[in-house]
Image (cartoon, rainbow, N blue to C red):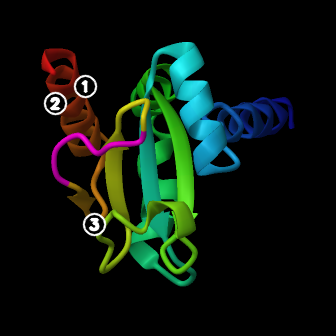
């Protein structure tokens, strides 16, 4: 019984370990990015998108990736059908991710589709390096 309780407490603490903080709006993401000197990661999603769910439930649960995202980016999730202030970004399917500078201008191309944590981390590092050269 003691082993079961230890395992249960470990699983509960692990499930809350990688709760990413997502910004409420594009405007608040820009303000936060400027004040914290971070880039903005915008992920467009939609209901019933299995790749979106994979990103949220599997990819973003990777501790290394979650820490990198939280420390280096202001995170913003946007429904692809409700992207009022982000109409200038082309979104034809989900998930589609853009990396934006602090003024809200895109850096590089969009990231289309789901990915494993190591692959997504590699791409984010490339975009971060690219933004440092601009």
- Compared across the picture, whether 99 is left or right of 45 comes to left
| Residue 35 colored in magenta in the image | no
**Where does the N terminus fall, quadrant-wise?**
top right
- Compared across the picture, whether 111 is left or right of 87 comes to left
Does residue 22 appear anywhere in the picture?
no
- Seen from the viewer's position, the closer of residues 21 and 14 is 21
Q: Earlier in the sequence, mark 3 or mark 1?
A: 3
What's the residue at 30%, 80% (across, down)? 92
Mark 1, other Cα within 10 Å: few <14 / some 14–19 / many ≥20: some
Q: Which mark is residue 126?
A: 2
Mark 2, other Cα within 10 Å: few <14 / some 14–19 / many ≥20: few
Mark 3, other Cα within 10 Å: few <14 / some 14–19 / many ≥20: few
What's the residue at 44%, 77% (across, down)? 50
Which residue, given by chain and number where applicable, does mark 3 sit on?
113
Q: Quadrant of residue 103?
A: top left
CB contact under 8 Å: marks 3 and 1: no
Q: CA distance from mark 3 to mark 2?
A: 17 Å
How far from the left and from the top, in percent, is residue 133? 13, 17
Determine the secondary structure under disc 3: loop
CB contact under 8 Å: marks 1 and 2: yes
Dominant secondary structure, magenta: loop
The stretch in magenta equals 104-109
Which residue, given by chain and number where applicable, does mark 1 sit on?
128
Q: CA distance from mark 1 to mark 2?
A: 5 Å
Determine the secondary structure under disc 2: helix
CB contact under 8 Å: marks 3 and 2: no
Q: CA distance from mark 3 to mark 1?
A: 19 Å
How far from the left and from the top, in percent, is residue 80? 48, 74
Image vertical order of residue 54 relative to residue 46, above or below: above
Q: Quadrant of residue 105?
A: top left
Residue furthest bottom as drawn: 48
Image vertical order of residue 104 relative to residue 33, above or below: below
């Amino acid at each position: 019984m003691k082993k079961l309780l230890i395992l249960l407490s470990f699983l509960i603490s692990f499930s809350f370990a990688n709760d990413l903080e997502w910004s409420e709006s594009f405007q608040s993401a820009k303000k936060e990015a400027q004040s914290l000197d971070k880039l903005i990661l915008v992920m467009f999603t939609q209901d019933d998108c299995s790749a979106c769910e994979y990103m949220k439930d599997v990819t973003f649960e990777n501790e290394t990736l979650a820490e990198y995202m939280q420390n280096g980016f202001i995170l913003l999730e946007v429904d692809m059908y409700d992207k009022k202030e982000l109409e200038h970004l082309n979104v034809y399917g989900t998930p589609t991710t853009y990396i934006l500078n602090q003024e809200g201008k895109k850096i590089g191309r969009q990231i289309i589709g789901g990915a494993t944590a190591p692959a997504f981390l590699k791409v984010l590092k490339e975009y971060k390096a690219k933004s440092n050269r601009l």
